Image (cartoon, rainbow, N blue to C red):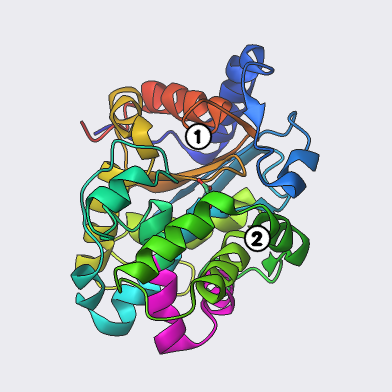
Amino acid sequence: MGRLPPPDKLTELLADVAVMVRPQKGKGRVADYIPALSQVSPDRFGMTVITVGGEESSTGDANIPFSLQSITKVPALILALNTNGDEIWERVGKEPSGTPFNYLAQLEAEHGIPRNPFVNAGALTVTDYLIDRLGNPAGAVRDFLKIVSQTDDVWIDETVAESEFGHAYQNKAIANILALHGTINNDPDLVLKAYCRQCAIHMSVVALTRAFLPLASGGFSPILGESVVTTRIARRVNALMMMCGMYDAVGSFAYRVGLPAKSGVGGGIVAIAPGVASIGVWAPELDRSGNSLLGTLALEQFVQATDLSLL
Ligand code: GLU
């Protein structure tokens, strides 16, 4: 695995990456199946790298909060694992799905057991689990992200949450199949509402990259000076991100970038270089799999320049 350049050179490199990816603008599409997300400017681009020593470098719109969407599935899983160890695995698998994030047929064929915690069916199951244990999963995830990033500017955008809930026809079907098979215990609408609120958490790329830093340093937060998760949980969450974090593009992402990562339809991606750094990027235009088009390209360019790929 490669090494990062010193902070001033790293900031220059990020600025170079931003210039390199710019010609691809206009080739993707901002998510519009959640109407509130379509209001975001497609021109945004922000990127941050934070080393395990706590040094931060950024470029572009890295301080503007955006909708995390599926990226929140990672802290939700961390809370579930922190709450009760391996219990969640009785209801959710750990295998890549090879299907879009909201695919229904696979869930039906597999008797209501989601492939992994990062497809929507799996994330809804984690939400259900957290409702029983923590009461308010979205609030718990928001508070966790606030604490780990040491940032106050982390909030649930209720307009985005309501916009998603009002149009969540596919996710409603998924929640109902989960209830039919007894994978979730609570009312499907209640679980879906909590899930939409969790997905509607907003924070900046800088704050997001800070929040994920413990996954790069064996569970230890250099910002808090204490462990946020055990080394074992950090390793396992990274494994799940590597195999399931980028939906049905997980193979091509491993081919191009070679790091565990999680994306969201808000256009964010956060990647982990274990032992070295966390890397966040935000660019709202998505490719056909629902991953940030410029974000993926930026990570590819960054990893090529630093040789940080794990593979
Ligand atoms: N809230 C979104 C959904 O369920 C999350 C999808 C994503 O970010 O990939 O459709």
The C terminus is located in which quarter? top left
Magenta segment, which residues? 125-145
Q: Quadrant of residue 60?
A: top right
Q: Nearer the viewer, residue 226 or 130?
A: 130
Q: Is residue 126 magenta?
A: yes
Q: Nearer the viewer, residue 276 or 203?
A: 203
Magenta segment, prevailing SS (helix, strand or loop): helix
179 is higher (above) or lower (below) than 245 = below
Q: Residue at x 63, y 34 (%)?
A: 283
Q: Residue at x 32, y 59 (%)?
A: 217
Q: Which mark is residue 109?
A: none
Residue 77 appears in view: no
Q: Is residue 283 magenta?
A: no
Name the residue beneath numbered marker 1: 291
Amino acid marked by disc 1: Asn
Name the residue beneath numbered marker 2: 165
Residue 148 appears in view: yes
Badge 1 marks a residue whose secondary structure is loop
N-terminal-most mark, 2 or 1: 2
Query: Residue 146: image x %, image y %?
Result: 59, 72
Amino acid marked by disc 2: Phe
> Is 124 left or right of 234, judged from the image as shown?
right
